[in-house]
Image (cartoon, rainbow, N blue to C red):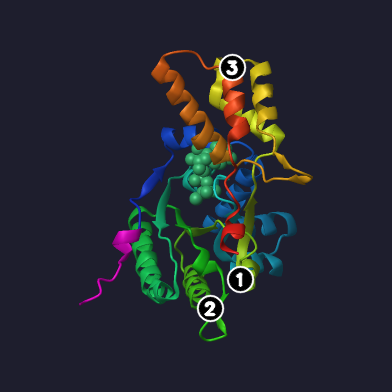
Amino acid sequence: MEHKRITARDVLSKTVSFPSDEAQARLSHLVGLDGHIKALTRDLRLIFDPQMVDAWSKRHYRSLLPVAELVKDAVPLIIFEGDVGTGKTALAETIGQQIAIDGDYGVHLVKMSTRVRGTGYVGEMGTLLAESFKHIEGIWAKEAEPIIFVIDEADSLLTARASEQHHHEDKSGVNTILQHLDEFRRSAAQIGVIAITNRVGILDPAVRRRATSVFKFERPNEHQRHELLQRLFDSALSDEDISLLVTASNPKTDGSEVRIPLTYSDLTLRFAIPAIREAAWRDGKLDAQSLAKALEFLVPTPCMSDLVG
Ligand SMILES: Nc1ncnc2c1ncn2[C@@H]1O[C@H](COP(=O)(O)OP(=O)(O)O)[C@@H](O)[C@H]1O
Ligand SMILES: [Mg+2]
Protein backbone atom coordinates (compact mmCIF):
# COMPACT_ATOMS: atom_id res chain seq x y z
CA MET A 1 0.00 0.00 0.00
CA GLU A 2 1.23 3.43 -0.80
CA HIS A 3 2.21 5.55 2.14
CA LYS A 4 0.47 8.91 2.01
CA ARG A 5 3.03 11.55 2.73
CA ILE A 6 2.15 14.42 5.03
CA THR A 7 2.51 17.76 3.25
CA ALA A 8 2.95 21.30 4.48
CA ARG A 9 -0.73 21.86 3.82
CA ASP A 10 -1.55 19.35 6.57
CA VAL A 11 0.54 20.98 9.24
CA LEU A 12 0.37 24.74 8.57
CA SER A 13 -2.28 27.03 9.99
CA LYS A 14 -4.06 29.76 8.09
CA THR A 15 -2.22 33.06 8.13
CA VAL A 16 -3.27 35.31 11.00
CA SER A 17 -2.60 39.04 10.67
CA PHE A 18 -1.87 41.74 13.24
CA PRO A 19 -2.85 44.20 14.55
CA SER A 20 -6.19 42.76 15.61
CA ASP A 21 -8.49 43.45 18.54
CA GLU A 22 -8.76 39.78 19.32
CA ALA A 23 -5.00 39.38 19.66
CA GLN A 24 -4.83 42.52 21.77
CA ALA A 25 -7.37 41.10 24.20
CA ARG A 26 -5.57 37.75 24.41
CA LEU A 27 -2.19 39.38 24.87
CA SER A 28 -3.37 41.68 27.62
CA HIS A 29 -4.81 38.74 29.56
CA LEU A 30 -1.45 37.08 29.90
CA VAL A 31 0.03 37.28 33.38
CA GLY A 32 3.67 37.23 34.47
CA LEU A 33 5.06 37.59 30.97
CA ASP A 34 5.80 41.32 30.80
CA GLY A 35 9.56 40.75 30.82
CA HIS A 36 9.28 38.14 28.08
CA ILE A 37 7.05 40.38 26.00
CA LYS A 38 9.54 43.24 26.20
CA ALA A 39 12.60 41.17 25.35
CA LEU A 40 10.79 39.22 22.66
CA THR A 41 9.56 42.41 21.02
CA ARG A 42 13.13 43.68 20.93
CA ASP A 43 14.53 40.44 19.50
CA LEU A 44 11.87 40.05 16.82
CA ARG A 45 11.98 43.68 15.77
CA LEU A 46 15.74 43.48 15.37
CA ILE A 47 15.32 40.29 13.33
CA PHE A 48 12.79 42.06 11.11
CA ASP A 49 14.74 45.32 10.89
CA PRO A 50 18.45 44.54 11.23
CA GLN A 51 19.24 47.96 9.84
CA MET A 52 18.17 49.32 13.23
CA VAL A 53 21.49 48.01 14.51
CA ASP A 54 23.41 49.74 11.69
CA ALA A 55 21.61 52.97 12.36
CA TRP A 56 22.39 52.73 16.06
CA SER A 57 26.06 52.05 15.37
CA LYS A 58 26.36 54.99 13.01
CA ARG A 59 24.44 57.30 15.30
CA HIS A 60 26.57 56.62 18.33
CA TYR A 61 29.96 55.69 16.85
CA ARG A 62 29.84 57.17 13.36
CA SER A 63 30.85 53.82 11.95
CA LEU A 64 29.62 50.28 11.51
CA LEU A 65 31.06 48.41 14.47
CA PRO A 66 32.23 44.87 13.68
CA VAL A 67 30.08 43.60 16.53
CA ALA A 68 27.02 45.05 14.81
CA GLU A 69 27.74 42.75 11.89
CA LEU A 70 27.76 39.80 14.29
CA VAL A 71 24.30 40.67 15.53
CA LYS A 72 23.02 40.55 11.98
CA ASP A 73 24.62 37.13 11.56
CA ALA A 74 22.52 35.54 14.30
CA VAL A 75 20.04 32.87 13.25
CA PRO A 76 16.48 34.29 13.29
CA LEU A 77 15.37 31.62 15.71
CA ILE A 78 13.84 32.13 19.13
CA ILE A 79 13.20 29.23 21.47
CA PHE A 80 10.45 28.90 24.05
CA GLU A 81 10.97 26.19 26.64
CA GLY A 82 8.88 25.33 29.69
CA ASP A 83 6.26 23.04 31.16
CA VAL A 84 2.91 22.47 29.52
CA GLY A 85 0.43 25.20 30.42
CA THR A 86 2.85 28.04 31.11
CA GLY A 87 1.75 30.27 28.21
CA LYS A 88 4.24 29.42 25.46
CA THR A 89 1.68 28.86 22.73
CA ALA A 90 -0.48 31.73 23.97
CA LEU A 91 2.42 34.18 23.80
CA ALA A 92 3.74 32.91 20.46
CA GLU A 93 0.26 33.35 18.98
CA THR A 94 -0.16 36.92 20.22
CA ILE A 95 3.28 38.57 20.29
CA GLY A 96 2.69 39.66 16.68
CA GLN A 97 0.22 42.16 18.08
CA GLN A 98 2.88 43.86 20.21
CA ILE A 99 5.32 43.93 17.29
CA ALA A 100 2.69 45.41 14.96
CA ILE A 101 1.83 48.17 17.45
CA ASP A 102 5.44 48.83 18.36
CA GLY A 103 6.78 48.84 14.81
CA ASP A 104 3.69 50.39 13.26
CA TYR A 105 3.57 47.80 10.50
CA GLY A 106 1.54 44.72 9.68
CA VAL A 107 2.72 41.34 11.01
CA HIS A 108 1.61 37.89 9.93
CA LEU A 109 1.66 34.59 11.78
CA VAL A 110 1.80 31.06 10.46
CA LYS A 111 1.84 28.14 12.84
CA MET A 112 3.14 24.67 12.21
CA SER A 113 1.52 22.21 14.53
CA THR A 114 2.75 18.71 14.44
CA ARG A 115 3.67 16.34 17.14
CA VAL A 116 6.82 15.07 15.60
CA ARG A 117 7.56 11.86 17.39
CA GLY A 118 9.46 8.77 16.40
CA THR A 119 12.52 8.56 14.21
CA GLY A 120 10.75 7.66 10.95
CA TYR A 121 8.91 10.94 10.99
CA VAL A 122 12.01 13.03 11.48
CA GLY A 123 13.18 11.83 8.09
CA GLU A 124 10.12 13.37 6.46
CA MET A 125 10.59 16.46 8.52
CA GLY A 126 13.23 17.78 6.14
CA THR A 127 10.82 17.86 3.20
CA LEU A 128 8.02 19.14 5.39
CA LEU A 129 10.10 22.04 6.66
CA ALA A 130 11.40 22.87 3.19
CA GLU A 131 7.82 23.06 1.92
CA SER A 132 6.73 25.10 4.91
CA PHE A 133 9.54 27.61 4.56
CA LYS A 134 8.75 27.93 0.87
CA HIS A 135 5.12 28.60 1.69
CA ILE A 136 6.14 31.27 4.17
CA GLU A 137 8.51 32.94 1.75
CA GLY A 138 5.59 33.03 -0.66
CA ILE A 139 3.52 34.89 1.92
CA TRP A 140 6.36 37.33 2.46
CA ALA A 141 6.67 37.93 -1.27
CA LYS A 142 2.97 38.72 -1.36
CA GLU A 143 2.60 40.79 1.82
CA ALA A 144 6.08 42.34 2.09
CA GLU A 145 5.53 42.50 5.84
CA PRO A 146 7.21 40.62 8.70
CA ILE A 147 6.18 37.04 9.34
CA ILE A 148 6.37 35.06 12.56
CA PHE A 149 6.62 31.34 11.92
CA VAL A 150 5.76 29.34 15.02
CA ILE A 151 6.82 25.70 15.20
CA ASP A 152 4.95 24.24 18.16
CA GLU A 153 5.86 20.94 19.81
CA ALA A 154 9.22 21.15 18.09
CA ASP A 155 11.02 18.78 20.48
CA SER A 156 12.49 16.58 17.78
CA LEU A 157 13.80 19.59 15.87
CA LEU A 158 15.59 20.98 18.87
CA THR A 159 17.01 17.84 20.43
CA ALA A 160 19.89 15.73 19.31
CA ARG A 161 18.83 12.35 20.59
CA ALA A 162 21.12 9.44 21.00
CA SER A 163 19.53 6.95 18.63
CA GLU A 164 19.07 3.53 20.19
CA GLN A 165 19.94 1.49 17.14
CA HIS A 166 22.95 3.41 16.02
CA HIS A 167 24.47 4.56 19.27
CA HIS A 168 25.22 7.90 17.76
CA GLU A 169 23.45 11.18 17.95
CA ASP A 170 20.62 11.71 15.51
CA LYS A 171 21.02 15.31 14.50
CA SER A 172 18.90 15.29 11.36
CA GLY A 173 16.09 17.39 12.84
CA VAL A 174 18.44 19.91 14.37
CA ASN A 175 20.51 20.22 11.23
CA THR A 176 17.47 20.59 9.03
CA ILE A 177 16.15 23.53 10.93
CA LEU A 178 19.53 25.25 11.28
CA GLN A 179 20.16 24.88 7.56
CA HIS A 180 16.86 26.44 6.60
CA LEU A 181 17.31 29.25 9.04
CA ASP A 182 20.74 29.91 7.63
CA GLU A 183 19.15 30.49 4.24
CA PHE A 184 16.63 32.85 5.79
CA ARG A 185 19.38 34.86 7.36
CA ARG A 186 20.92 35.50 3.99
CA SER A 187 17.70 36.43 2.24
CA ALA A 188 15.90 39.74 2.48
CA ALA A 189 12.74 38.09 3.75
CA GLN A 190 11.59 39.36 7.12
CA ILE A 191 10.92 36.06 8.80
CA GLY A 192 11.38 35.18 12.46
CA VAL A 193 10.91 31.66 13.80
CA ILE A 194 9.69 30.76 17.28
CA ALA A 195 10.26 27.10 18.09
CA ILE A 196 8.51 25.71 21.17
CA THR A 197 9.28 22.77 23.39
CA ASN A 198 7.47 21.54 26.48
CA ARG A 199 10.56 19.83 27.77
CA VAL A 200 13.18 21.69 29.69
CA GLY A 201 16.89 21.02 29.39
CA ILE A 202 16.73 19.03 26.15
CA LEU A 203 17.95 21.69 23.76
CA ASP A 204 20.73 20.68 21.44
CA PRO A 205 23.77 22.79 22.36
CA ALA A 206 24.18 23.88 18.73
CA VAL A 207 20.63 25.21 18.70
CA ARG A 208 21.04 26.93 22.05
CA ARG A 209 24.28 28.54 20.88
CA ARG A 210 23.02 29.79 17.56
CA ALA A 211 19.51 30.86 18.44
CA THR A 212 18.93 34.57 18.93
CA SER A 213 17.46 33.87 22.36
CA VAL A 214 15.93 31.23 24.60
CA PHE A 215 12.93 32.12 26.74
CA LYS A 216 12.12 29.98 29.74
CA PHE A 217 8.51 29.77 30.90
CA GLU A 218 7.69 29.01 34.54
CA ARG A 219 4.67 28.06 36.60
CA PRO A 220 3.15 31.10 38.32
CA ASN A 221 4.37 32.19 41.75
CA GLU A 222 2.04 33.45 44.47
CA HIS A 223 1.98 37.00 43.14
CA GLN A 224 1.25 35.83 39.60
CA ARG A 225 -1.49 33.48 40.77
CA HIS A 226 -3.04 36.44 42.57
CA GLU A 227 -2.95 38.55 39.44
CA LEU A 228 -4.34 35.76 37.27
CA LEU A 229 -7.26 35.01 39.59
CA GLN A 230 -8.03 38.69 39.94
CA ARG A 231 -8.10 39.15 36.17
CA LEU A 232 -10.23 36.06 35.68
CA PHE A 233 -12.86 36.76 38.33
CA ASP A 234 -12.68 40.55 38.44
CA SER A 235 -15.60 42.07 40.36
CA ALA A 236 -17.17 38.68 41.10
CA LEU A 237 -14.82 38.11 44.04
CA SER A 238 -13.57 40.41 46.80
CA ASP A 239 -9.88 40.94 47.56
CA GLU A 240 -10.36 38.69 50.57
CA ASP A 241 -11.84 35.95 48.41
CA ILE A 242 -8.94 36.18 45.99
CA SER A 243 -6.44 35.92 48.84
CA LEU A 244 -8.27 32.85 50.10
CA LEU A 245 -7.98 31.28 46.65
CA VAL A 246 -4.31 32.18 46.34
CA THR A 247 -3.62 30.40 49.63
CA ALA A 248 -5.65 27.40 48.51
CA SER A 249 -3.58 27.26 45.33
CA ASN A 250 -0.23 27.14 47.15
CA PRO A 251 1.88 24.09 46.31
CA LYS A 252 0.96 21.21 48.61
CA THR A 253 3.46 19.54 50.84
CA ASP A 254 3.85 15.82 50.78
CA GLY A 255 5.49 15.01 54.10
CA SER A 256 8.56 17.20 53.97
CA GLU A 257 8.55 17.41 50.19
CA VAL A 258 6.95 20.39 48.46
CA ARG A 259 5.07 19.26 45.37
CA ILE A 260 5.14 21.12 42.07
CA PRO A 261 2.95 24.21 41.72
CA LEU A 262 -0.13 24.51 39.52
CA THR A 263 0.35 25.86 35.99
CA TYR A 264 -1.40 28.86 34.45
CA SER A 265 -3.50 26.53 32.41
CA ASP A 266 -4.42 24.41 35.48
CA LEU A 267 -5.80 27.58 37.06
CA THR A 268 -7.54 28.71 33.90
CA LEU A 269 -8.77 25.62 32.08
CA ARG A 270 -9.07 23.14 34.94
CA PHE A 271 -10.25 25.45 37.70
CA ALA A 272 -11.79 28.76 36.56
CA ILE A 273 -13.69 27.53 33.53
CA PRO A 274 -15.35 24.55 35.28
CA ALA A 275 -16.23 26.86 38.19
CA ILE A 276 -17.96 29.32 35.88
CA ARG A 277 -19.78 26.52 34.10
CA GLU A 278 -21.04 25.17 37.40
CA ALA A 279 -22.23 28.58 38.62
CA ALA A 280 -23.88 29.46 35.32
CA TRP A 281 -25.67 26.14 35.20
CA ARG A 282 -27.08 26.50 38.70
CA ASP A 283 -27.62 30.21 37.93
CA GLY A 284 -26.08 31.35 41.20
CA LYS A 285 -23.14 33.39 42.40
CA LEU A 286 -19.64 32.06 42.78
CA ASP A 287 -18.86 30.90 46.28
CA ALA A 288 -15.33 31.53 47.51
CA GLN A 289 -15.37 28.66 50.02
CA SER A 290 -16.26 26.02 47.45
CA LEU A 291 -13.84 27.54 44.97
CA ALA A 292 -11.07 27.25 47.57
CA LYS A 293 -12.02 23.65 48.20
CA ALA A 294 -11.85 22.87 44.48
CA LEU A 295 -8.40 24.40 44.36
CA GLU A 296 -7.21 22.33 47.31
CA PHE A 297 -8.03 19.19 45.35
CA LEU A 298 -6.68 20.32 41.99
CA VAL A 299 -3.70 18.14 41.08
CA PRO A 300 -0.96 20.04 39.20
CA THR A 301 -0.07 18.98 35.68
CA PRO A 302 3.10 16.90 36.03
CA CYS A 303 6.39 18.06 34.53
CA MET A 304 6.87 16.86 30.97
CA SER A 305 10.48 15.86 31.67
CA ASP A 306 9.33 13.67 34.57
CA LEU A 307 6.85 11.88 32.34
CA VAL A 308 9.26 11.15 29.55
CA GLY A 309 12.44 10.70 31.60
N1 LIG B 1 0.86 33.50 31.53
C1 LIG B 1 -0.44 33.24 31.42
N2 LIG B 1 -1.36 34.12 31.81
C2 LIG B 1 -2.67 33.86 31.70
N3 LIG B 1 -3.18 32.72 31.22
C3 LIG B 1 -2.31 31.79 30.82
C4 LIG B 1 -0.90 31.99 30.88
N4 LIG B 1 -0.30 30.88 30.41
C5 LIG B 1 -1.26 30.04 30.04
N5 LIG B 1 -2.48 30.56 30.29
C6 LIG B 1 -3.77 29.91 30.03
O1 LIG B 1 -3.55 28.54 29.79
C7 LIG B 1 -3.92 28.17 28.46
C8 LIG B 1 -2.91 27.17 27.91
O2 LIG B 1 -1.65 27.79 27.80
P1 LIG B 1 -0.65 27.50 26.60
O3 LIG B 1 -0.14 28.78 26.08
O4 LIG B 1 -1.31 26.59 25.62
O5 LIG B 1 0.49 26.72 27.37
P2 LIG B 1 1.76 25.97 26.77
O6 LIG B 1 1.81 26.25 25.30
O7 LIG B 1 2.92 26.54 27.53
O8 LIG B 1 1.54 24.52 27.07
C9 LIG B 1 -3.93 29.48 27.70
O9 LIG B 1 -4.81 29.44 26.61
C10 LIG B 1 -4.41 30.44 28.77
O10 LIG B 1 -5.80 30.37 28.94
MG1 LIG C 1 1.67 24.80 23.81
Residue drawn where x is 53% and y is 81% of the image: 164
Which marked residue is nearer to the observer: mark 3 or mark 1? 3
Residue drawn where x is 55% and y is 50% of the image: 84
Residue drawn where x is 36% and y is 69% of the image: 128
Question: Label 3's element?
Answer: loop
Q: Position of residue 200 (x, y in %)?
A: 63, 59
Task: Determine whether label 3 and label 1 are within 8 Å by CB.
Answer: no
Chain-order first, disc 3 or disc 2:
2
Amino acid type, callout 3: Leu
Residue 215 located left or right of residue 178:
right
Amino acid type, callout 2: Lys
**Rendered position, 232 above or below 212:** above
**Rendered position, 309 above or below 97:** below
Which marked residue is nearer to the observer: mark 3 or mark 2? 3
Q: Residue furthest top?
A: 284
Task: Determine whether label 2 and label 1 are within 8 Å by CB.
Answer: yes
**Which residue does the numbered mark 2 point to in the structure image?**
171
Question: Label 1's element?
Answer: loop
